[in-house]
């Protein structure tokens, strides 16, 4: 989707870099590596540990109902890294950070009906066995960390069947979130607002994910720094985004983009304070969002008419 109109200023963003290792079966290379690491015996090398045995090639997810991926991703995939499809949402998983790049949901009024038999207390936080245990979080990583296992695809959005809500409790759909003041409060307010829109409008598409944004430090330079928790070294995002695209009438859409810091937020703060230009999230995340929406179909962004320049 080409845009001739720029919505607001861009955030100052930094780019972090990850070290990429590789295995070698060459004995000479291995011997050199051993010699190199022996030169500096006092320098600690920290590697993530997992108490879970390696997954065998035959391990699979339990049988799931047919995915609605084509409906959910109607307006484009932000990326194709480690895709996982579920009954009502699609997820792209980041093996390095042990959390998702993004999660996309498609909600309609008929899917938002309350079903009394659906019991959240029957849901268990559990690993997604389609991801190797080396590359995902475990429940133990969160214990004593001070962070909640925060849903990206909200459990409250998927109460149509027990299977639907169960799938939102895979740890691949979790990210470390500050509990009181964020996950249980202001972030929950944004989730409830999205549900309100979904009950009212024809179709609602929600893209949610973590961000790791740069901050200026005492030396005047910008750095991307984030905490990790547990033996799996699960990355703690500095921010979370949620982009909501909703169809108000056939082929007419509005969009709202939210960016919230992963910290305690005063309860009286209105969620509209966290509206940001969509391109600010896209630049930070490194992918386009809902870029396949037809030209001219989007009428408003963050409550403001856009004219026809989208």
Image: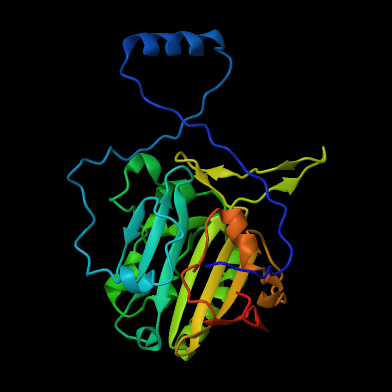
In the foreground, 191 or 183:
191
At which x and y percent is residue 277? 66, 68
> Relative to 227, is 62 on the left or the right?
left
Residue occupying the point 30% across, 72% down? 68
> Relative to 110, is 143 on the left or the right?
right
Which quadrant holds residue 108? bottom left
Residue 181 can be seen, yes or no = no
At which x and y percent is residue 263? 66, 59
At which x and y percent is residue 93? 41, 52
Q: Quadrant of the C terminus?
A: bottom right
Residue 173 can be seen, yes or no = yes
At which x and y percent is residue 76? 43, 66
In the foreground, 90 or 8:
8
Residue occupying the point 56% across, 67% down? 2
Residue occupying the point 17% across, 45% down? 58
In the foreground, 65 or 282:
282
């Amino acid at each position: 989707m080409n845009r001739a109109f720029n919505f607001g200023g861009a955030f100052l963003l930094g780019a972090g870099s990850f070290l990429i290792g590789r295995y070698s079966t060459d004995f000479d290379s291995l011997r050199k590596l051993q010699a190199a690491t022996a030169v500096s015996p006092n320098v600690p090398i920290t590697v993530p540990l997992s108490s879970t045995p390696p997954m065998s090639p035959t391990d699979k997810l339990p049988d799931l109902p047919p995915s609605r991926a084509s409906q959910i991703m109607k307006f484009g995939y932000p990326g194709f890294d480690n895709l996982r499809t579920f009954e009502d949402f699609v997820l792209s998983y980041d093996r390095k950070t042990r959390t998702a790049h993004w999660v996309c949901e498609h909600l309609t009024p008929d899917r938002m009906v309350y079903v009394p038999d659906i019991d959240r207390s029957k849901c268990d936080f559990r690993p997604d066995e389609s991801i190797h245990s080396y590359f995902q979080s475990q429940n133990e990583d969160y214990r004593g960390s001070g962070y909640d296992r925060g849903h990206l695809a909200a459990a409250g959005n998927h109460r149509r069947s027990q299977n639907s809500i169960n799938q939102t409790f895979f740890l691949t759909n979790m990210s470390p979130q500050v509990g009181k003041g964020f996950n249980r409060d202001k972030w929950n307010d944004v989730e409830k607002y999205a549900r309100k829109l979904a009950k009212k409008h024809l179709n609602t598409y929600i893209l949610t994910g973590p961000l790791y944004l740069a901050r200026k430090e005492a030396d005047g330079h910008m750095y991307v720094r984030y905490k990790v928790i547990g033996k799996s070294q699960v990355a703690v995002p500095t921010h979370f985004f949620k982009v909501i695209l909703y169809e108000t009438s056939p082929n007419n859409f509005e969009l709202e983009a939210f960016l919230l810091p992963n910290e305690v937020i005063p309860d009286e703060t209105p969620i509209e304070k966290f509206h940001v230009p969509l391109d600010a999230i896209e630049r930070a995340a490194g992918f386009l969002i809902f870029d396949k929406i037809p030209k001219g179909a989007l009428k408003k962004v963050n409550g403001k008419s856009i004219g026809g320049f989208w």
